[in-house]
Amino acid sequence: MKNIVLISKSILLIFISLIISSCSEDEPVQIALYLPVANFSYEAFDKKVVFTDKSENADSYYWTFGDGETSTEQNPTHFFKASKRYSVELTIRGEKGKTSSKKMTVDLSDGSTTDPEDVNITIDGDFSDWQAVPSSMLATSSIASYVTDLVALKQVQLCGNDNYVFFYLKADAAKFNVVQFYIDKDNYNETGFLGWYWSGIGSEFLLEASREDNLAPTVMEYDDANGNGGTGWNWITLFDPAAKAIEISQFVAGENNIVEVEGRIIRSYVPELGRTVKMGVALVDASWAASGLLPSKLEDGGLNSAITVKLP
Ligand SMILES: [Ca+2]
Ligand SMILES: [Ca+2]
């Protein structure tokens, strides 16, 4: 259908050009040029990646996969050797040799990069909708049985869609005054704050919110220039609680001081989140002592890695 439209447009342009040129012999004939625009998507299955061309006006294709391999197929399937990040580039050539390129990072570092499914959570204090979240999009961390201190945080669940990162918390209300979400936006521990609680997480953002304030958070960005990407505590306040970067349900009270709450972090308040985000959640009690931690430390006391959540 598109081709027919393009052809008829071309015929029309040529026809008009002929009329113009027959009217005035000195005018050059105008011929429309359809410029190439490179684009593609991909789906990864472990280290096998299926690329789908989404370009416009391409006559030929040239792929570089970032591992020294190339292809001239329109829709190549490529097998990578390692589970890491590759910079893949598609260059297309169209009419009159015009070219266009598109570059994308293919991140195989966490083993699954299939296109995420859309998820949604209603912030209503009914937690049954979490069971409908596809397992590939749901990240859950529960307190380990061997944990004897920092026991206030029992469970965290995370998932996200284009607009929100949804969270579920289950905690001991007697020891839960402030929640801290440490967010590694780029899943890259050489940028951001290297916390004391987890390994392999370099947090760019910290959302710190008190229960009395309905979790209205102060959003802080790590000051890389003055913290030097290490463990120096140096954050810049981006938004104060009035910005309402978090919306929550009511706290649902259970037995033994347990409370449950679901909420959503508005993604636009935490800029530049990648599609794979690492997060750690800590609780602080009324005297500002750490009281809860998920993921928990390892059984030997060593640092655990953070929760990894997939976002669209
Ligand atoms: Ca709900
Ligand atoms: Ca980082």
Image (cartoon, rainbow, N blue to C red):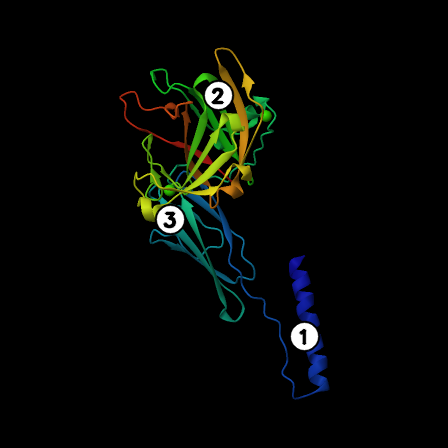
Label 1 environment density (alpha carbons within 10 Å; few <14, some 14–19, many ≥20):
some
Q: Nearer the viewer, residue 296 or 85?
A: 296
Query: From the viewer's perspective, is 51 left or right of 87?
Result: right
Q: Return the x and y of residue 272 as percentages of the image width and height.
A: 47, 46
Q: Residue at x 33, y 30 (%)?
A: 197
**Which residue matches tag 3?**
86
Q: Return the x and y of residue 228 as percentages of the image width and height.
A: 30, 45
Give the amino acid type for the residue marked by disc 1 in the picture.
Ile
Which numbered tag is attached to residue 260? none
Instruction: Indicate the secondary structure of the residue bearing disc 3.
Output: strand
Which numbered tag is attached to residue 170? 2
* Residue 138 at least partly seen: no
Mark with earlier residue (3, 1): 1
Residue 13 position by quadrant: bottom right
Q: Is mark 3 within 8 Å of ligand 2?
A: no
Give the amino acid type for the residue marked by disc 2 in the picture.
Lys
Mark nearest the camera among 3 and 2 is 2
Mark with earlier residue (1, 2): 1
Q: Return the x and y of residue 215 as percentages of the image width and height.
A: 51, 30
Instruction: Indicate the secondary structure of the residue bearing disc 1.
Output: helix
* Residue 265 at least partly seen: yes
Residue 248 position by quadrant: top right
Q: Nearer the viewer, residue 14 or 240?
A: 240
Q: CA distance from mark 1 to mark 2?
A: 69 Å
